[in-house]
């Protein structure tokens, strides 16, 4: 079986909007889109894929996924929230994301928020997640090779089995996140 460790390096799973990449001035929507296009360029599966669009950002605003803008400009905190939304949207529903971010947005509206320390912690955890992911991918790859060898199956099935295993792992993490969100929602209701 191919070694998928090279895929991790090639795909560059470490794409992210770093704190130092976010200008210290408020941005217009086109500038936010450009920042994300640059920051996540290596994450695209193909050249036509869009990271963020005006419609997406406007829908996030209408859905109250982040607190209101000031003079149609996005602050550094807005950019950090949009980055979190971008990461969560592939796993959670818009309503779930809103539930996760409600407390942060409430503090922002009260002008009692500097997201930078929180976002720095998030970026730090991401780096650990990438290292864990690389190890787990290698472990699953080896296990798939063993299973296929024992079953005497053709090599072409190894990739399919690895994909199925990774999807299952992804679903386990998704369910864990949803369970935490449900507990968070129940706690807010009581």
Image (spheres, rainbow, N blue to C red):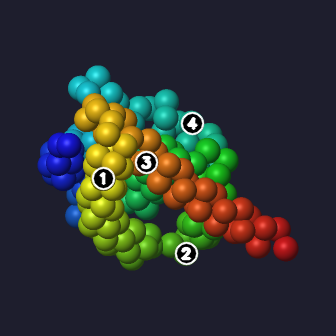
Query: What's the residue at 64%, 66% (across, down)?
Result: 180
The residue positioned farthest toward the top in the image shown? 48
**Badge 4 is on which residue?**
59
> In which quadrant of the rendered view does residue 29 lie?
top left
Residue 123 in the image: x percent, y percent? 33, 67
Is residue 91 toward the left or the right of residue 159 in the image?
right
Report the residue at 44% width, 41% height from top. 164
Residue 10 placement, left or right of 171? left
Contact (Cβ within 8 Å) of mark 2 with mark 3:
no
Q: CA distance from mark 1 to mark 4?
A: 46 Å
N-term-proximal mark, 3 vs 4: 4
**Image point (49%, 35%), residue name:** 56
Measured as percent of width and height from the top left, residue 182 is found at 71, 62
Q: Is residue 53 left or right of residue 94?
A: left
- Residue at image point 48% right, 39% down: 57
Q: Which residue is mark 2?
A: 112
Q: Residues within 10 Å of mark 2 (few under 14, many from 20)?
A: few
Q: Earlier in the sequence, mark 2 or mark 1?
A: 2
Q: Kindly report which numbered mark, 4 or 2, lies closer to the viewer in this rendering.
A: 4
Question: Dot 1 lies on which element?
Answer: helix
Distance CA(mark 3)–CA(mark 1): 14 Å
**Earlier-in-chain disc, 2 versus 3:** 2
Where is residue 41? Give x, y as percent: 23, 40
Mark 1 neighbour class, 10 Å CA radius: few under 14, some 14 to 19, many 20 or more: few
């Amino acid at each position: 079986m191919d070694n998928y460790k090279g895929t991790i390096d090639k795909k560059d799973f470490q794409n992210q909007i770093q704190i130092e990449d976010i200008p210290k001035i408020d941005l217009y929507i086109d500038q936010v889109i450009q920042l994300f296009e640059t920051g996540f360029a290596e994450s695209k599966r193909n050249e036509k894929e869009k990271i963020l669009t005006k419609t997406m950002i406007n829908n996030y605003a209408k859905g109250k996924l982040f607190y209101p803008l000031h003079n149609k400009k996005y602050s550094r905190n807005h950019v950090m929230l949009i980055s979190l939304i971008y990461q969560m949207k592939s796993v959670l529903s818009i309503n779930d994301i809103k539930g996760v971010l409600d407390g942060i947005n409430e503090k922002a509206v009260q002008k009692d928020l500097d997201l930078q320390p929180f976002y720095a912690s998030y970026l730090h955890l991401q780096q650990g997640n990438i290292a864990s992911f690389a190890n787990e991918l290698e472990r699953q790859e080896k296990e798939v090779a063993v299973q296929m060898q024992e079953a005497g199956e053709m090599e072409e099935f190894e990739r399919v089995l690895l994909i199925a295993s990774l999807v299952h792992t992804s679903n386990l993490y998704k369910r864990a996140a949803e369970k935490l969100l449900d507990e968070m929602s129940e706690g807010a209701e009581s």
